[in-house]
Amino acid sequence: MRKWSNNLFLGLVVLLISFLVACSGESGEETSSNDGESTNDNANDDAVTLKFWKSEDIGRADYQAFMDVVEKFGEEHPEIDLQVDTTPHADYRTRLNTQAAGGQLPDVFQVWPGAELEPLVDGGVVQPINDITSYWTEETGLLDEEDFDDFSIDGDAYAVPANTNPTHMIFYDKDMLADAGYDEFPETYEEFLQLIEDLNASDITPMALGNSDAWVLQSVYISTIADRFTGNDFLEGVSSGERAFTDSDFVQSLEVIDELVKKEAFNPDLNTIDSTQMIDYFLQGRTAMVMDGNWGISSILENMPEDKNIGVSMIPLNDKKTISTVAGTGVAINSELEGEKLEAAHTFLQYVYNQELWEELIKVGRPIIANVDVPDDAELHPLTEEMLEVIAESEPAPVYDATLTPAVNDQLENELQSITVGGSTPEEAAENIQRVAESELE
């Protein structure tokens, strides 16, 4: 379970009030790659070379904020020749896992928490950062010890968390909903289903969905929807064998997906377009809503037409306000590093994960994990403020792909896709997922 930064949300409330008084009112992805470009043209002749891998999310403000800090590190540390190699987000995981299996990882590299970190730890390709966590927890006070939990395995921390990732938001076109008779976003699931019917009756596709990569229905949809039925301890119960995916409450969550498909809530090509294209559909007015993670707001603000009137909410389901949430990415250190290269890696982490980065992330609307106040010069877009209010009112829930083993998560994603094309009933899907889960427990 993650904690929200009280300072952040307190500051956001103050910022929101100031705005109202003054005014009364895990993503575009490029296919290019930056192969080991040095960030330091002034590196000393005897500089220590440090190779860094990062997934590339050109067009996202938080990505640019991070890379700006990385570039400054290169400028301010001539004793370290930082060579940055970026890979498009959609391809990064494959590259990381392939190179990890072959023992060909760089010195420092982006990783994800939880279940995705475990194979790297089990494979012995990353090393703990326990020796330097006190820099954040004691020396600067920027983080608390529990902030490292999502990147910790068996008591050892392996990366520094930068932000939290609420993976479920519904962005909606206020004008399109108003034309359908809805001045406010539905407050109950029954009203939500009625909205879908009313939009369809007006020949408007209700919701944009791009699930070609399969993770969207898992991370954005089922992680939150299932928690509304099962509660936060369900996945822990599954891992211990006390709960099962065939339990009626989890099956009910799959029935929600099945119901939305049968009510024609989505675009027909939901399994052939990706998460970037689904945002495009929404901004082009081809749908009235899109469900995405908090990161979706970056592309929306960057590309939305000036006359687009957008609101944000969460699915109204079972009188609960949980939103699936996980720590964002971190940077891990290659287990082979020692001596001056290890010291350089520690210097890099301590420089990047600091006050400046977290303040810049706040400015672009990312919920952070650090004890950092909203900067005085932060100018948040009203939609960002609205999204952060939704997050502040919610409780975090587990994200499935950050908790499940890869085999079980793959089966879950396959079954969710199968439900959308009528290949599996919710009951059949649950049985197939449970079969893989049981094999993982053996």
Image (spheres, rainbow, N blue to C red):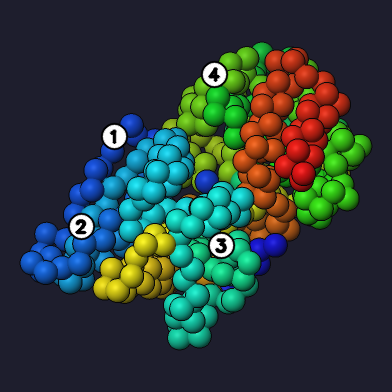
Q: Position of residue 354 (x, y in %)?
A: 40, 72
What's under tag 2, amino acid-wise? Answer: Thr
The residue where tag 4 is placed is: 272
Q: How many marks?
A: 4
Residue 39: mark: 2
Name which of mark 2 and mark 3 comes first in the sequence: 2
Q: Is residue 258 left or right of residue 143?
A: right
Separation of residues labelled 4 and 1 (CA atoms): 22 Å
The residue where tag 1 is placed is: 32
Q: Residues within 10 Å of mark 2 (few under 14, many from 20)?
A: some
What's under tag 1, amino acid-wise? Answer: Ser
Residue at the extreme bottom of the image, as rendered: 139
Query: Is residue 140 shown to the viewer in this render?
Result: yes
Separation of residues labelled 4 and 3 (CA atoms): 33 Å
Q: Is residue 430 left or right of residue 397?
A: right
For the residues labelled 2 and 4, say whether their Cβ atoms are less than 8 Å apart: no
Separation of residues labelled 2 and 4 (CA atoms): 38 Å
What's under tag 3, amino acid-wise? Answer: Phe
Q: Position of residue 250 (x, y in %)?
A: 84, 39
SS label for mark 2: loop
Residue 359: mark: none
What residue do we see at 25% from left, 42% from top? 34
What's under tag 4, amino acid-wise? Answer: Thr
SS label for mark 4: loop
What residue do we see at 73% from left, 58% from top? 395
Name which of mark 4 and mark 1 comes first in the sequence: 1
Residue 48, picture quadrant = bottom left
Query: Is residue 184 shown to the viewer in this render?
Result: no
Separation of residues labelled 2 and 3 (CA atoms): 27 Å
Viewer-closest of 198 and 349: 349
